[in-house]
Image (spheres, grey):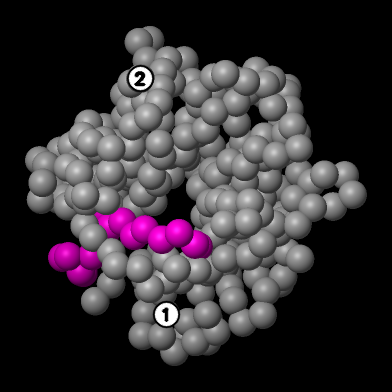
Amino acid sequence: MCGGADPEGYDRIILRRSRTVEGLAEAEEITIWDEKDTPSAHRYIWAPEIHEIDGKWYVFFAASDSADNVWDIRCHVIACEGDDPYTDKWIDKGRFQACEGDEFSFRWFSLDMTYFESGGKSYVAWAQTDGNSNVYIATVDPKEPWKTTSPAVLLTKPEYDWEKVRIPVNEGPAVMIENGKVYLAFSASATGPEYCIGMMYADEGADLLDISNWTKLDRPLLTSDDLYEEYGPGHNCFVKDEYGNWVFVYHSRDKKCFDGKCGYSHEDSLYDPCRSARKRNVRWDENGLPILNG
């Protein structure tokens, strides 16, 4: 079963832990939250991200606000009551809240929330529809990181051809800070073989709510053409391995799925559960920009 026909799919948040990135593949997984634990968040449960903020653990994720509409998706938050996210209890903080006067943020389809810090400020970035799916940014108070403290600012929208294949989309923001720069990757286009990863960057410490401080690259950094028997790379995150090297983890589909032999290919790619997690090392060019297709 897949997509909307599966009554149990995409209904929980699981957690694995390991001392190495490679170890996560075989690590025990536990369920830290299930949709049945709250009346306010329902499947689909998508794009969970765990963050340690001001000494406490949080998971940002997307869930439907409606029990009978899996696409009524908004950004939600759960918080760990103790110090160990693997063993301590998690509590539901509800839907992400917009600051007073912001009548835009989280009022309709929104997902892919991420958190980062730069220049002594705490930020969140997420995808939200406003005709197209765009990426927005706002500040938060790390003591209450389930509320924005500034109105949403449009960070990037689909502009180039590679961002508008089948569906104009920017989503899945992910941040890496290195070399005095804030690098924000995002995913573009529909979720089939056309799915790809773009990037924009700003100086670390700059006012990141001022769009003039950002530079957006006019080409994608990773596409299906860069990969062997992998298709549709997208929605990545950045982590450091045990040696302090940057790694980006992303999902893509294999050749069996691309050739229509996986059993789900008759569905729209959005309903296809065959996206698998993969990793690659980040390299750097002579200008200090990350290379994802090396």
Q: Are marks 2 and 1 in contact (CB under 8 Å)?
A: no
Q: Looking at the image, can residue 235 be seen?
A: yes
As drawn, the residue found furthest toward the bottom would be: 261
Residue 237, image x, y percentages: 53, 51
Judge the density around disc 1: few (<14), some (14-19), many (≥20) Cα neighbours within 10 Å. some
Judge the density around disc 2: few (<14), some (14-19), many (≥20) Cα neighbours within 10 Å. few
Q: Secondary structure at mark 1?
A: loop
Foreground pick, 44 / 202: 202
| Vertical placement of residue 26 versus 127, above or below | below
Quadrant where the N terminus is found in the figure: bottom left
Residue 46, image x, y percentages: 34, 52
Q: Which residue is mark 1?
A: 265
Residue 85, image x, y percentages: 28, 45
**Residue at the location (47% across, 82% down)?**
257
For residue 54, what is the image quadrant?
A: top left
Q: Which residue is mark 2?
A: 143
Nearer-N-terminus badge (2/1): 2
Query: Which amino acid type corresponds to the residue marked 2 in the rendered image?
Result: Lys
Q: Magenta segment range?
A: 4-21
Tally of numbered discs: 2
Tell me the mark number nearer the camera, choosing from 2 and 1. Answer: 2
For residue 248, what is the image quadrant?
A: bottom right
As drawn, the residue found furthest toward the right would be: 286
Q: Is residue 6 magenta?
A: yes
**Residue at the location (42% across, 66% down)?**
24
Foreground pick, 112 / 166: 112
| Vertical placement of residue 185 versus 291, above or below | above
Residue 162, image x, y percentages: 68, 56
**Residue at the location (60% across, 31% down)?**
155
